[in-house]
Image: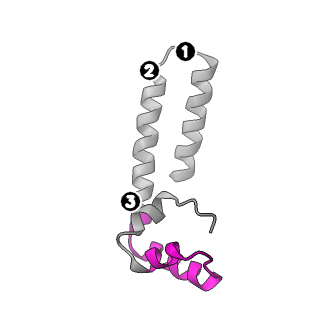
Amino acid sequence: REGNPGLPIVLALPRAAEVARVFALEAPNDDDVAAAVAAIRGCGVLDEARTMALEYGHRAHACIAGLAPSTDRDQLLGMVDQLIGRVS
């Protein structure tokens, strides 16, 4: 509703006509949103988005781990680890 699409929505737009219909609405109602959520859950993009997020997270972790040891590096690694944990 905030006009800020997440990865599952972006992946679902070309695959699920209902998602595209609701996303194009200026002011979707609760039933519209519920229909779009059901379409997102039903078209398989949630697993795909989770896999992509984990892959990017692991790549980011590997890149950051290659930096010189520092407090900043440790904080970045901790942030990436938290995000990976949320997705897992």
Q: What residue is drawn where x is 44% and y is 47%?
A: 54
Q: Residues within 10 Å of mark 1 (few under 14, many from 20)?
A: few
Which residue is label 2 attached to? 66
Q: As displayed, is residue 83 above or below residue 34? A: above
Q: Amino acid at mark 1?
A: Pro
Front residue (pair 9, 71): 9
Circles 2 and 1 in contact, beta carbons < 8 Å: no
- The quadrant holding residue 75 is top right
Instruction: Point out the residue furthest to the left here.
Output: 15
Which residue is label 1 attached to? 69
Front residue (pair 2, 65): 2
Secondary structure under tag 2 reads loop
User: Disc 1 or 3, which lies upstream in sequence?
Assistant: 3
Alpha-carbon span between mark 2 and mark 1: 9 Å
Q: Amino acid at mark 2?
A: Gly
- The quadrant holding residue 42 is bottom left
Q: What residue is drawn where x is 60% and y is 33%?
A: 78
The chief SS type of the magenta part is: helix
Which residue is label 3 attached to? 48
Q: Amino acid at mark 3?
A: Glu
